[in-house]
Image (cartoon, rainbow, N blue to C red):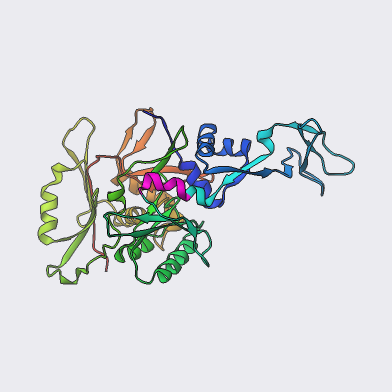
Amino acid sequence: MTPVLDLSRFWELLETNFPLAGPRSELRTRLGSDEATALELGQVLTYLRIADAVACPHPGGPGCPRQVIQLNDGRFQGVCGNDPSECEDVDLQRDDVEVIGVDQEHLCEALRRPLCIGGRVEPLPGLRNVFRAGTFKPDTVTRHSVYLVVRSSEHEYTEAFDALRSQMEGQSFAVLVPTDRFIDSGSVRQMGTLGVPIIGLQGLVDVELTGHLVMSADALDLFGGIGRRATSSAAISAPIVAQVHTDRGWQELDDAGYKRLLEAVDDFDLMADERSGTVWKREQGGALHVRADSVQPSYFHMIRFAVEKIGYFDPDVHGPEDRAAGKQTFQRARKAIDVKYTAESGRAEWRLFKTRKVDDHAEYQFEPDPDYRYALIFLPRN
């Protein structure tokens, strides 16, 4: 079996540095040597040019950084641009001066194989960093366009989705994004109601050592939501008393459904109920549930924000409006509602909400462990 390399760092850098480019040695440091080499083999990263300058460890003066010159014998040197020189000349390797970068069309073409899409690749006129990556054909007569959209903030993504939806004039399509960390949950719901899935590539598409991109999901499952417009819940006659999130997503519960769920508590490893303020947790080794009463309502409130946030969750930014001491509140809520355990690596991990390092500070991501049975029950929102 061909080894597969994790492209998480690539998708993150692509999103905030589009189109990603730099000296080969720099990208190998930022992406990982094996990952950068594989992406270059697959022509996702391609040679662009020789760099005009290279960074200096002691920058200063108007002639900095060092200028790149090629000697008669083909070697490269970095020469101080200040007069008089403030730094000595340095010998450079070809990897230090050859700039490689993402070719947008090659990236879309490389995605076609794992995503099982075909057709032409082209940028969309008038929409910055939006590309038609191809067409998904689930059968011989149905065709759905698939677009790659790259932005670096929630606001920019929302604007791009609105513009793309307007341009498509009611047609069904799918949207690929490098990561879901900047995707607002409202955009996901709104696009979903129109039958337009938003699909994050991070954690979904990686690369083999040969340079071929590979996907960890089935294309039919991935694009199954195209064209499936959400039905209205107005026809539901019984009053909704709770909303629950499980591995199947969100579900609304009437009183009978709520009672049935509570009766099935032994089917779960974790159940948390905002209505009663109760949390049940299964101990390691399969023991009976441990019951904790009177969990603060603010904990459930914070946890719901974390569940609904697509991508990384910063309690001080994405939490409730009254988010005084948001991070401390979230950490206490996670301790009350989540389950901590020791992973095979020996590190302490959480079953539902993972800690992520982002720009030298901690953020969180709702990413339940596979096969972990949980039910998070919340009061219905008005």
Asked whether, in this view, residue 350 is left or right of residue 233, the answer is right
Q: Which residue lies at the image location 42% right of the left edge and 50% below the top edge?
A: 312
Q: Is residue 309 visible?
A: no
Secondary structure mostly seen in the magenta stretch: helix
Asked whether, in this view, residue 98 is left or right of residue 272, the answer is right
Residue 349 lies, with reference to residue 180, above or below; the image says: above
Q: Position of residue 357 (x, y in %)?
A: 48, 42
Residue 333 lies, with reference to residue 192, above or below; the image says: above
Q: Which residue lies at the image location 46% right of the left edge and 55% below the top edge?
A: 121
Q: Position of residue 220 (x, y in %)?
A: 28, 50
Asked whether, in this view, residue 83 is left or right of residue 282, the answer is right
Q: Position of residue 29 (x, y in %)?
A: 58, 35
Q: Position of residue 190 (x, y in %)?
A: 34, 66
Locate residue 66: give its quadrant.
Answer: top right
**Residue farthest to the front?**
140
Q: Considering the image in quadrants, where does the N terminus appear?
A: top left
Residue 213 lies, with reference to residue 103, above or below; the image says: above
| Extent of the magenta region | 108-116
Asked whether residue 120 is drawn in magenta, I would say no
Q: Is residue 345 visible?
A: yes
